[in-house]
Image: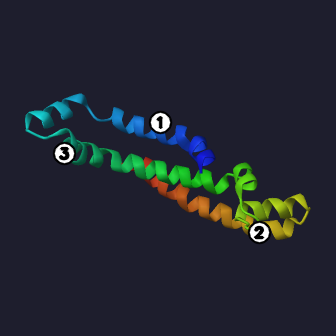
Amino acid sequence: MIVYFVRFFALSSNGIKSGYLKINQSMDESAYLLGYSKFKTFTKVHIPYLKNSVLLISILIAIEIIKELPITLILRPFNFETFATTAYIYASQDLLEAAAAPSLLLILTASVFILFVSKYILSDN
């Protein structure tokens, strides 16, 4: 888990940071003038602005985890295969027909996530 955390920390922290840069400082000051506490400002102002960024980051991390092979090969338990490891094992044994099915499932799963990301990017958010 620590390896996955270190691997994907940069992606998530940069995404959250870019979401926070969209929030203007005057919005926080206005909330404080209206009597909001820091916690209430976070829940009523920051979370609605960060909701879309967190969703986008989650989808991007899911895509990265699906296609991450080296960490999965090192850290997987015995007798546990994922689509990526199955495709890798079959491809390394030159069984390309057997590697086609898990590879296509990886591509289809990643495509669904990519469609969600593209809808988010093309929307007016």
Q: Earlier in the sequence, mark 1 or mark 3?
A: 1
Q: In which image quadrant can residue 24 be found?
A: top left
Q: Secondary structure at mark 3?
A: helix
**Amino acid carrying mark 3 in the image:** Lys
Measured along the vertical axis of the image, is residue 98 above or below residue 72? below
Quarter-of-image position of residue 102: bottom right
Cα gap from disc 1 to disc 3, whole angstroms? 24 Å
* N-term mark: 2 or 1: 1
Q: Position of residue 17 (x, y in %)?
A: 41, 35
Question: What number is the disc on residue 40?
Answer: 3
Q: Residue at x 73, y 66 (%)?
A: 81
Residue 7 placement, left or right of 96: left
- Are dots 1 and 3 in contact, CB under 8 Å? no
Q: Residues within 10 Å of mark 3 (few under 14, many from 20)?
A: few
Q: Is residue 46 visible?
A: yes
Crowdedness of circle 2 by 10 Å Cα count: few (<14), some, many (20+)? few
Q: Residue at x 54, y 58 (%)?
A: 113
Identify the disc placed on residue 14: 1
Judging from the image, what secondary structure is the residue with disc 2 in?
Answer: loop
How far separated are the C-alphas under marks 2 and 1? 36 Å
User: Closer to the observer: label 2 or label 3?
Assistant: 2
The residue to which callout 2 is attached is: 79
